[in-house]
Structure formats: structure tokens, C-alpha cells
Image (tube, grey):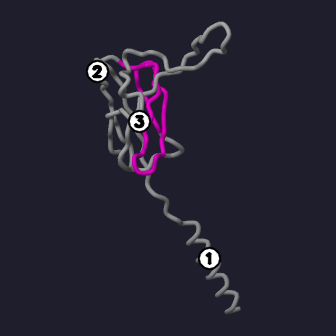
Amino acid sequence: MMLNWKLFSIALAAVVICGCSKSEPLGTVKGVVTFKGQPVTEATVSFRNKATGDSASDVLDEEGKYEIRAAGGMDPGDYQVIILPPEVEVSLGPNSPPAMKPKDMPNVPKKYQSAQTSTLLTVLRVGTNEVNLELSE
């Protein structure tokens, strides 16, 4: 009987240790993207973690709002933000198939459309983060 109790105690301890593994706390981000005080409505906002390279995105709604939960949340840290216009089909001529290219959007300056040139930086913390982005020329 004493041996069964010891085996039960060991098994119970193993279940508790495995079942209670602590995961890293995560954050979410929401906000509004504007240009000259007006909402940007046709674009995708993308947050890229500078340390890991991981990214998460959301399509802006008709009020320029976004909310990124990324499978439960994002790692806290420094992020670069990129604003990507939707892609549109363009004709390359009668003998070529159409190609996709970013839509020309005057309310999303080109500098924000690339990881090489975007100057939008933010720090995300554990929990809910609000990051409103005012784009400038």
C-alpha cells in the first residue's frame, strides 16, 4: 500500500509540473491610422518585432481602426510599423498577363510602405496597447 501511495504522489507531481507550465505574457494592440487628420481606410497595418522578426497585421476598417490579437497576443518589445496599401491588378500590355502592384494612395506616403524606410516605431507591453498612428508627408 505504501508503494502505491508513492507512485500516486510521483504521478500527481508530474501532472502538476507539466500542466502548470507558465507561458510568456503577451500583448495586443489597437488604434487608428490617420493622414492629415483623416482616417486611412484602404490599407493593412503590420507590426514587426525588431528582435524576432515576427509580425502581425490587420486590415484597417472604414474608420481607420485596427486591432491585432495575433493568436492570443504578441510578444512585448520594440516594433516597426508598416502601412501597406492594397494590391491592384495592372495591365502590362495586350500580350502580357496582368500583374499586381500596390495601389497608388496619396494618404499613405511611400516611406511608410517598406520596412527599409518606415520610421514608425513603438514599444508593445504586456496587456492591451493603444497605438494611434498619424502619418505625415
Callout 1 secondary element: helix
Q: Circle 3: is it few (<14), some (14-19), or many (20+) Cα within 10 Å?
A: some
What is the distance, in whole Å, between disc 3 and disc 2 at their CAs?
17 Å
Looking at the image, residue 44 sits to the left or right of residue 81; the answer is right
Marks 1 and 3, the one that precedes in the sequence = 1
Q: Which residue is mark 2?
A: 137
| Circle 1 or circle 3, nearest the eye | 3
Q: Circle 1: is it few (<14), some (14-19), or many (20+) Cα within 10 Å?
A: few
Which quadrant is the C terminus positioned in? top left
Marks 3 and 2, the one that precedes in the sequence = 3
Residue in the picture at 43% in, 41% down: 48
Marks 2 and 1, the one that precedes in the sequence = 1
Q: What is the span of residues highlighted in magenta in the rendered image?
A: 39-68
Q: Is residue 66 magenta?
A: yes
Nearer to the camera, 36 or 100: 100
- Are the two marked residues, 2 and 1, in contact with CB atoms closer than 8 angstroms? no
Which image quarter: residue 3? bottom right
- Residue 15, position as x, y percentages in the image: 61, 72
- Are the two marked residues, 3 and 2, in contact with CB atoms closer than 8 angstroms? no
Q: Is residue 114 magenta?
A: no
What is the distance, in whole Å, between disc 1 and disc 3 at their CAs?
50 Å
- Residue 29, position as x, y percentages in the image: 40, 39
Residue in the picture at 38% in, 15% down: 106
Give above or below for 49 relative to 82: below
**Number of on-image labels:** 3
Which quadrant is the N terminus positioned in? bottom right
Q: Which residue is mark 3?
A: 115
Identity of the amino acid at label 1? Leu
Callout 3 secondary element: loop
Residue in the picture at 58% in, 69% down: 18
Q: Which mark is residue 12?
A: 1
